[in-house]
Image (cartoon, rainbow, N blue to C red):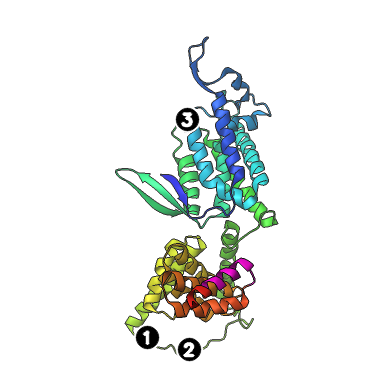
Amino acid sequence: MLPIHTSIAPRRTPYGNYVLIAINVVIFLLTYWPHRNPFTGSAEVLRPWVQQLELIPAKPHFWQFISYAFLHGSYMHIIGNMFFLYIFGNNVNDKIGHFWYLCFFLVGAVFSGLGHVALNANSPVPTIGASGAVAAVTGAYLVLFPQTIITVLYWFFFIGTIEVPALFFIAFKMILLDNVIARFTPYVAYDAHLAGYTFGITSILVALATGLVSSSNFDLLAMIKRWNRRRHYRDVVSNGYDPFTGRTPRKSVTIREVQKTPEQQREQAIIQELREKISDRIAQRNLAAAAEPYLELMDIDSKQILPRQHLLDIANHFASDNRPDEAAKAYEQFLTHYSNYEYAEQVELMLGLLYSRYLHKSQEAIKHLEKATEKLSDPGQLQMCKEELSRLQS
């Protein structure tokens, strides 16, 4: 099972990650040299002078705790490590910045090396490869983006793809299955991997808790806090405490429930399921997957209103996906219910352009463009708006 795509992309170019990948490739090309030892006849994959850079648990030197992470023993070795670094490192680099990302990678290499040496102190087998540092980066991804979706390529009797939440794929497949349960492949530094994951998860959790890395509503620390609040709420309510009045025991209140027909109940359940699906997929930044349940929701009940940012995100997705009709309807709904939005004039401009250039509804376009003209402050947007109005009115 190979992760091939994540549901989020970095907002800034991850130059730090690209630099690390380039350095690893260059060092591989300088050090890789498959040959046979002229004295023993045994196969060797690295040039002789590289031996002093390998990490040997039985007699380690301090510089080897970094140098070993930039050595690889085959093309598949470096391709595999750099592929995983690319998949998970880009977003981590974007989140913590270039300098701190480079430092994080190096310290992750040191900690994974220390963990391997501590658990294999008498081993004379040299250890090389960036997989321990890559495990630290992957652990950081698990903490920072646990709710994102990872597209996984699988092949058993047939080949296909599935989408799995990052939290479950990394925690259960990559950590538990690959490095704890299925420790079958010889000469694989499983302990270095586990030490790297431990460092990556622990250090980023501490960084989030102390404010060194900005938290969000979607990282693992926020998920833990929400779970703890729900647990605490259940505990106090189960003891009879009323959180709304502060009194205990809670005063019983008789509520007369409005009876609904079975059809109404089914429709309400579908609506609730669709709203939850939209919310979850937007939280995972998977707008393409959120758009379709939104359209289903509108077909069932066009009066259903999403939270402001969710509705705007879906409207923007339709516009960028070249679906002007759906985009226009979503923008219209947005302006109807969120007319006090601080950037409403930009929504008016977008709606006017959709009606003018794609839907060929001149009167609607003029109405929205005129409203946008009254409030637009950006010179470029204002000029574009006036030119479009002039073209429509000529």
Image quarter of residue 129: top right
**Which residue is situated farthest in the front direction here?**
394
Contact, mark 2 vs mark 3 (Cβ under 8 Å): no
Foreground label between 1 and 2:
1
| Secondary element at image label 1 | loop
Question: Which stretch did the figure color magenta?
Answer: 377-388
The residue type indicated by label 2 comes to: Ile
Q: Residue at x 45, y 68 (%)?
A: 278
| Mark 3, residue position | 75
For marks 2 and 3 on the same chain, the one whose residue lies earlier in the sequence: 3
The tag earlier along the polypeptide, 3 or 1, is 3
Residue of label 2: 255
Q: Where is residue 216 in the image (x, y as percent from the top left)?
A: 61, 61
Query: In this picture, is 60 found above or below 95?
Result: above
Q: How many labels does the image show?
A: 3
Classed neighbour count for the residue bearing mark 1: other residues with Cα under 10 Å, few (<14), some (14–19), many (≥20): few
**Residue identifier under label 1:** 260
Q: In which quarter of the image is residue 233?
A: bottom right
Instruction: Specify whether residue 241 is painted magenta.
Output: no
Q: Gap in Å between the C-alphas at discs 2 and 3?
A: 70 Å
Q: Residue at x 51, y 11 (%)?
A: 40
* 36 on left or right of 219: left
Q: Position of residue 344 (x, y in %)?
A: 57, 75
Where in the figure is residue 158, as x and y percent of width and height?
30, 45
Q: Going from the N terminus, do you reach mark 1 or mark 2 first?
A: 2
- Is 383 a magenta residue? yes
